[in-house]
Amino acid sequence: MTAVPAPQEPAVEDFAGDALAGLSAQPKTLPSKYLYDTRGSELFEAICEQPEYYPTRTELSILQDEAASMAEAVGPRALVVEYGSGSGIKTQRLLDALPDPVAYVPIEISHSALNASVAELATQFPEIEMLPLCADFLQPVRLPASERPAERVLIFFPGSTLGNFDTDAAVRLLTTMRTEMGDNGAALIGIDLKKDPAMIEAAYNDAAGVTADFTLNLLDRMNRELDADFDRERFTHRARYNAIAGRIETHIVSDCAQTVRVAGRPIAFTEGEGILVEYSCKYSQSDFAAMAHRAGLVVTRSWTDADRRFALQLVEPLPE
């Protein structure tokens, strides 16, 4: 059974307010969630297919190889809640492995991506109730009740998306998960592990330029939705690994001194000035365990690939 998701994508006024606030700050920033309009979501799926982008294929291999172990750890009749569900490829492997999941609740900001994912999953898993929510998972959401009672809530957060937040914001998100999962719940979270910086940087600077197109698509979106007049030819994608902070920092960089209008307001850029649009934090196992502990969670199981490039971590509430 599939519920029809109500369109709750961020209003233009929210986008305009966030854009103007971020572009007026020093240094300039834009929230990474705005990268994922319909075109951005399509480009991200293409990024995942690039040979340099190891996280997706590595995580998929872990899900394939360790599915039985994960299913045993989660247990039967889970209500599966996924933050930022995207295309649902990883979800297919998880739902196929879990014993008798009662319902699936994808929370996705892109209405088109949500509809496409749910339509595909509903066909593959007709016995699982589909309860999609078109919303920003960073905002409080009310989880729908499933027709069949669930033994526990499992929050699924793959793709190393947690790494898009700085440490304090990541802890806040983990704390939200702790609240939503309840005392008997769990979360299965993908994290990208620290490794050779050259391999990390290559993943965010693919030779085909798909990641650059994904990043610069944000300028096209502002032109279309906020009546901006960015000239893409005057901006460059830049993604560099900050070894001290342990993260990729992605900027859209102005190639010259220029003034751009956004929602009727002039925004001045100096040559070489960047807009920070995304973090991609990399963790050690102890880094992640410490963040989880701050959120009232403990790592109970961990699965990695043979080269220890990526990990899926099962966290549960800290015992009282």
Image (tube, helix red, strand yellow):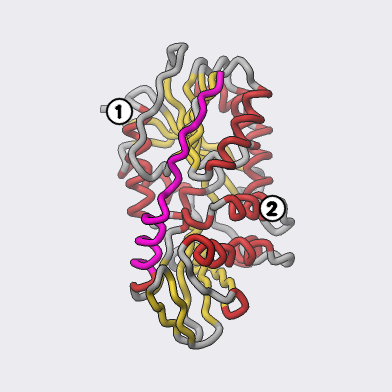
Give the vertical position of 143 relative to 169 (above or below). Answer: above
- On residue 229, which mark appears? none
Task: Tell me what residue is drawn at x 50 percent, y 56 percent.
Answer: 282
Q: Give me the C-alpha separation between circle 1 and circle 2.
A: 41 Å
Task: Tell me what residue is drawn at x 48 percent, y 70 percent.
Answer: 228
Figure quadrant of residue 183: top left
Q: Indicate the amino acid at tag 2.
A: Ala
Image side of residue 199 versus residue 170, left or right: right
Q: Label 1, secondary structure: give it.
A: loop
Residue highlighted by disc 2:
46
Give the vertical position of 158 relative to 101 (above or below). Answer: below
1 or 2: mark nearer the eye: 2
Q: Position of residue 211 (x, y in %)?
A: 63, 62
Local crowd at mark 1 within 10 Å, few (<14), some, or many (≥20)?
few
Give the vertical position of 235 relative to 303 (above or below). Answer: below
Most foreground residue, 296 or 18: 18
Q: Quadrant of the N terminus?
A: top right
Residue highlighted by disc 1:
319
Q: Label 2, secondary structure: give it.
A: helix
Q: Is residue 2 magenta?
A: yes
Span highlighted in magenta in the image? 1-22
Task: Tell me what residue is drawn at x 48 percent, y 20 percent.
Answer: 78
Q: Position of residue 53 (x, y in %)?
A: 67, 55
Q: Position of residue 149 (x, y in %)?
A: 43, 12
Local crowd at mark 2 within 10 Å, few (<14), some, or many (≥20)?
few
Most foreground residue, 100 or 287: 100
Task: Tell me what residue is drawn at x 49 percent, y 25 percent.
Answer: 131
Most foreground residue, 10 or 187: 10
